[in-house]
Amino acid sequence: MIAPALLALLLASVRQEVPPSPAPAPDGGEAQGESERKQEGGDAPPVEVPPQEVPRPAPSDVPADLPPAAGEAAPPPPQAENPAPSASTLPPAHPPVTWPLSSEALAAHLRGIAEAHPTIALLETLDRSAQGREILVLRLGLRDGGEAARPTLLLADHHGRASAGPEAMVALAWRLASAHEQDEGVRALLARASLVLAPALDPDARSESVATLQLGASSVEPVAAAPAARAPLARFERNFPSGWQPETRRAGSGRVSLSMPETLAATRFLAGLDACSVVLGFAPTSPPGQPYAGAELPAGDREVFQRLAAALERPGARALIPWYEHGSPGGGFFDFAYQARGIYPLFFALPSEEELTRTGAAPFVAEVGERVLGCLALLPRVELAQEAFERVAPDTWQLDLRLVNAGLVPTASALVGHRGVRADVVLALAGAKLLATAHRARSGTEYTPVFEVRTPLSAGTLAGGEERWLRLLIEAGPGAAVSVTASSPWAGRAQLRLTLP
Amino acid sequence: MQRAGRSETGRWAVRLVLGLCLGAAPWAAQEPGREPGPEPAPAPPAEESQAEQQEKPSEPPPAQETPPQPEPSVQEVPKPQAEEPEPAPANPAPTLEDPPPAAAAPVSTGDVLVPPQPAYAFLEDRDSFLARWQASGLVQPLALGTSAGGRELFAVQFGAPGARPLAERTTLFLLGGLDGVSMAGSQAVLSTVSELLADPGRLPPEVAFVAVPWANPDGLARWRASGTGDGRNDRTIDDDGDGEVDEDGPDDLDRDGMVLEMLLEDPLGPWVRAADPRFLRSAREGEAPRYLRLREGLDDDGDGRFNEDGPGGVLLDRNFPVGWEDCKGPESGPWPLSEPDAKALAELLMARRAAVVLVFQGNHGLLASPGGRTRAEHALPLPEDGPTYRRLAEVFSSHAQRDQAQAVSLAEARGEPWPGSLVDWSYAALGALAMEIGVWGPEVEVGRRGPVDAQFKGPEGNGKNGAAPGPSVPEIGLEQAWARWLDDTRGGSGFLDWQPVQLGGQPGAWVGGWEPDTILNPPLDALPEALAGLTGFVSDLASSLPRLEIDAVARREGKVCLVKARVKNSGLLPSGVGPGSHASAVRLRLVVSPGMTLRAGQLETVVGHLPGRGTSDEYGWLLIAPEGALLRIVAESAWSAPIEREVRL
């Protein structure tokens, strides 16, 4: 459940950040388009614009919360569980977020957030696109050195201007980063989970489509020198290795997978994001599709997808689309995320461009923000509690533990297991010698001994909300400081410390 | 079954047979609506082509093949760009004896190179090979970078002297030991290059050869060091995801200097002893005792598993994009082409006109076509390329004197799925005629006492030919074939019988199995036999590559010119294979001069694949052109460099 104050903050921020709404000019987009053409025409790096200057909307920009057209009812305000916080709790203002943002404007926003909130936000450049734009990722979370191991939620988008996903991410990032300094709930949330935002994994496509109004423009595979090596055009969403087919069979896929700098950068990035269990993307609204031929979807994972989508349902909002209904033909970023890394992808159903133009992006931005916060709370999170502790012999102690996955997402997907990568929850004991272990079923009271004691102890995979009871018989002298640490790549780390009498 | 011996007469006869086989190649089959060609022009100077000429009376070309005679007012100016007089090589004829070879390297003894004593060569020997090869004046080294372990990916290119740079020619790739295990594969590449360079007359014009003898330098180095290994490169990976790296690798438990296999008694194990107690078979319900079959070693990290995280990282031949997703476990790499050597090979192939890709590796003894994946929707090769691969298998079989009655896919040859391979990728993505050549196999050593039945028809039966491949049984059948070879030709030497070992508290543990240089690589004295015939096969393949030709005529009616051109593939192999015929198709292009306007026909025409053996297609154009204007017609394909014909209108 989202903290009511958080939700209120988010909703308030969306309302607050919207500038006065000028009517769209007939020559919409020209000013921004000119700016981008200058960028593309020269070799200069992307312009860094101070945050207070960059997202300044051109007169033709469509503001995020453009009022409804005459004669149309205003969209109902999202329901908050609590009233909006008082003015004193509202974070400071930040540059407005307008739709559509070009790649350059997006980059400036991300830089602005990182510069304004260095204790909570970290900007990372994955690589440069084929046209030289930076591929940026913003990490939000308490920067105390342990962030890489914290349960992580990734938001990623690679579409052109038709998607309001990047704008939603930027708005959310501003609000979370700003609220972090004043709101204990936000601090607690970002101390136990990390949010990683990749708003434009294909920045060239974003920039080109915003500039030229051509949707879904693609980046270009590098062209080799020899005539025979002339590479065909490759598309971002066809160039990933899972479900990939060569260019000879599917146009836009390239002669090798990951032939584009953007796809290779995204793959490397994802492969290093060990703590990420869920990735949220954006997809046009379409009838439910099927996984591509040959894709794997174990029944256990399908159930997790369904539970996640159900838990993130909101009244009046389109349901999140689980990966298996996305209908990808293969070769996509999200296909790779699930098939190769076992990460659960779900998609926000994008409002149409016409809808965005008519109503503005504010309702969608608010919906995304609310669900992202909700999803952070559903990530797997290992917790460890002491149930009982007694001396059973001199220097021999019996420690009963309860191990819990406090999230809804399991500590590893079934597909992670299929890939042969172990993602068990393991327990490590320090300060004492482990003599024997036993475990207890949820319903029973009797412990069953485990005959083969090995360290670290593996607790296997815990489903969402699952509890395990473990009994450790340990040997340690008086006054020993003993600790038990439970950890898993997806579910983070929990530690129990005790000092023996 | 008895075979001819390996006398020179026998070799000549094999080549004659090959020539006849190629002459009747099904890839020359006529397509509907397509003109069949005349008998192919004799392949350049290979001796088998001469033999073929002697055997076959010349036939007049079919009437429809004869191009129309040009009108007197039109002058045709043939311009065989690709056949300009070729300069003499910078150096005199190759003298491979000079400089003196390294101790373990082959030396020339006329037209065949044989090692002074059979020996395997390794990356450290590259300089001596390169020096001798470069003495031919035909060889250039290629810089491909290094492996994950920092070892050089040594490569050379060579070809007959000619005006066209090697990098622009139709290219035949020779890759050895990509699996990181097949030292014999590396040796096959080395001996093939040496033998081709020893007789440069066998190098067809307009063809480049690229050789990478040690395509997996890390894996091969590991094998060399230990006599065992699984072919992985030097990337360090956490195989079991426990946060530790390489903490539980194999061990020499019985201290015999070899790390072989280990059987552990386990009530849930999938194996039981076969009738021949050396070997195992799948357990049936109720059978006991059962075994796990593992590499020899301890549970070093005490996690209950044996040797699950040993040295070594990624298998290069699982690291290519087609089928990579089918691979399980970290040994296929975190993403396709994640390994520098795999990426370098892929980039090299993409940068060239990759017509033929031969990967010398494996111990199945067969020519294996693409098809490492077993799901029907991923089946390779395409049905239309089946006849080409079948014929190649026959030709290979004749050259190397193997018993291969039909084409087999990678998965069939390997007895298990083999996804993510270079062969599958280069066929499916580049349209290359790609195949794996199993240098060593249970049937190869036939010179000793006749062929071993290598069709794997042992009592266990695995349906080698025809049965669905997969992990069900094949390895047992294959092992039986190997057992027969071992017993029939080697007196049983080469398999260490299972010996009990103490494994802590673990009851029932034995170590034993195949010794190094038995089934994965030939014993040294069998190496020459394993390599025999491979150079002839490669040479014939190169001589059979497609050769595009253009015949053109023009007729003028006032200011209007009618131009007809016939594009022909006079080679024996098709002009392309694989999916995506549009990308790899032959294309015909008009280059018009100023003042010309095209009134009918297209500036660029996709001809498609021409099956070969003189098959041709005809195209026509109407142009308005001033008298005496020069029109150029260009044909090219992914495999073939552009050829040009000029027509004076």
Image (cartoon, rainbow, N blue to C red):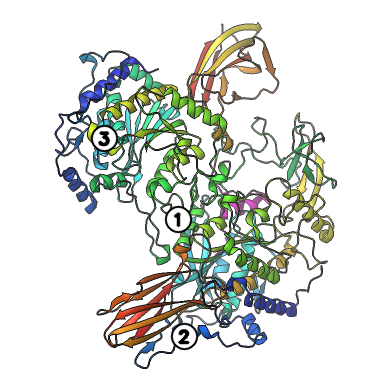
- The numbered mark 3 sits on a residue in which chain? A
Q: Which residues are magenta?
A: B211-236
Determine whether, in the image, residue B555 is placed left or right of residue B225: left
Q: Which residue is mark 2?
A: B67
- The numbered mark 1 sits on a residue in which chain? A
Amino acid bearing label 3:
Leu
Establish if A230 lies above or below B116.
above
Q: Dot 2 surroundings within 10 Å: few (below 14), some, or many (20 or more)?
A: some
- Quadrant where the C terminus of chain B lies? bottom left
Amino acid bearing label 2:
Pro
Check residue A247 in the rendering and tell me which mark sits there, or answer none.
Answer: 1
Marks 1 and 2: in contact by CB < 8 Å? no
Check residue A356 in the rendering and tell me which mark sits there, or answer none.
Answer: 3
Q: Choose the circle earlier in sequence order: 3 or 1.
A: 1
Determine whether, in the image, residue B350 is placed left or right of residue B250: left
Measure the C-alpha gap from mark 2 to mark 3: 65 Å
Rendered location of residue B227, percent (x, y) = 68, 52
**Residue A217, can we see it?**
yes
Establish if B573 lies above or below A431.
below
In front of the other: label 3 or label 1? 3
Measure the C-alpha gap from mark 3 to mark 1: 34 Å
Rendered location of residue A251, percent (x, y) = 42, 54
* Mark 3 and mark 1 on one chain: yes
Rendered location of residue B48, percent (x, y) = 64, 80
**Residue B105, can we see it?**
no
- Quadrant where the N terminus of chain B lies? bottom right
Establish if B43 lies above or below B524.
below
In front of the other: label 2 or label 1? 2
Element assignment for label 1: loop
Examine the image and state in which quarter residue B508 appears.
Answer: top right
